[in-house]
């Protein structure tokens, strides 16, 4: 059965805020980004108290989950209060190897009366000491646990999962096989690079503490959807302010519209 579009569309952004590295040099760029491109829904990774306050200040028309622990130091979720009402929220342990890292989620009731589970996570970095010791990919089991948790939370309902996936294959396959579709594939496209941003405010060599090799360009930031949602646009945002990037990741932005059976749209 072909589904018709509803009259309710919204813009979602996912963004790795790069903790508080070089924050003094890039906080004006972060403020400029959210002032210029304020999303209706915002999910972030590598959050810190300083950047949580920055987002609160620059998006006064939004609300977020008012929580401690990982909600302050890992991720959080913002929504426009004139478009969405929060019903409940939670944080699921899905095996991510960072303090207080979870699958963070909020159940929202949009203005049109439907329901949406909006969620985010930051999967384990491949350079984590445990993974370097046994060379076992943690992100596959984490993605599987996330899909299972969202199945329980959202069922067949509208569900958005945003993520810094820290990988270029296996965990995406887990999500795809669980019925999730990223915002680029949904539109018949490949994602542009989301990391690293060039040029960056960071100084020093382009390798990491684990290797002298530069980080290869890759797409690791994603918006996945399942249920009655249609992707309308999808973009990796190339944004600089006074020549400075807001983060070492690019934000990913997608527009979605709720779908409904044709019988619901009959006049």
Image (cartoon, grey):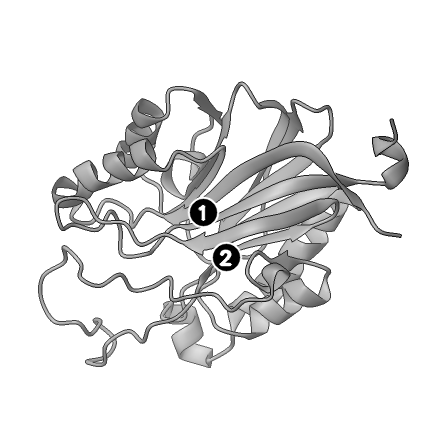
What residue lies at 32% left-to-right and 46% top-to-bottom? Answer: 17
> In this picture, is 139 found above or below 113?
below
What residue lies at 29% left-to-right and 36% top-to-bottom? Answer: 51
Q: Which quadrant of the figure contains the C terminus?
A: top right
Helix, strand or loop at label 2? It is strand
Left or right, 68 with respect to 231, comes to: left
Between residue 181 and residue 90, name the one nearer to us: 181
Q: Position of residue 195 (x, y in %)?
A: 34, 64
Helix, strand or loop at label 1? It is strand
Residue denoted by label 2: 222
Residue 35 seen: yes
Asked if disc 1 and disc 2 are in contact, CB closer than 8 Å, the reply is: yes
Residue denoted by label 1: 14
Q: Position of residue 127 (x, y in %)?
A: 36, 70
Residue found at the very far front of the displayed protein: 267
Pointer 2 local density, CA inside 10 Å: few below 14, some 14–19, many at least 20: many
> In this picture, is 141 found above or below 155?
below
What residue lies at 28% left-to-right and 73% top-to-bottom? Answer: 215
Q: CA distance from mark 1 to mark 2?
A: 7 Å
């Amino acid at each position: 059965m072909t589904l018709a579009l509803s009259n309710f569309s919204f813009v979602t952004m996912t963004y790795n805020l790069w903790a508080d590295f070089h924050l003094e040099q890039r906080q004006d760029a972060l403020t400029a980004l959210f002032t210029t491109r304020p999303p209706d829904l915002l999910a972030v990774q590598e959050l810190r108290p300083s950047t949580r306050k920055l987002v609160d200040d620059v998006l006064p028309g939004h609300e977020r989950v008012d929580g401690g622990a990982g909600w302050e130091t890992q991720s959080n979720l913002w929504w426009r209060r004139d478009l969405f009402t929060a019903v409940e929220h939670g944080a699921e342990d899905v095996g991510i190897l960072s303090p207080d890292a979870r699958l963070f989620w909020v159940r929202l009731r949009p203005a049109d009366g439907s329901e949406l589970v909006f969620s985010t996570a930051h999967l384990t970095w491949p350079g984590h000491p445990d993974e370097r010791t046994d060379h076992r990919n943690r992100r596959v089991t984490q993605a599987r646990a996330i899909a299972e948790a969202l199945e329980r939370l959202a069922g067949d309902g509208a569900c958005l999962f945003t993520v810094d996936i820290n990988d270029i294959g296996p965990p995406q396959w887990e999500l795809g096989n669980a019925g999730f579709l990223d915002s680029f594939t949904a539109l018949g496209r490949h994602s542009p690079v989301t990391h690293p941003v060039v040029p960056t405010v960071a100084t020093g060599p382009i390798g990491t503490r684990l290797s002298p090799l530069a980080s290869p360009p890759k797409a690791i930031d994603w918006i996945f959807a399942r249920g009655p949602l249609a992707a309308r646009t999808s973009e990796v945002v190339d944004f600089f302010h006074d020549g400075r990037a807001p983060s070492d990741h690019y934000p990913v932005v997608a527009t979605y519209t709720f779908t409904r059976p044709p019988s619901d749209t009959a006049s």
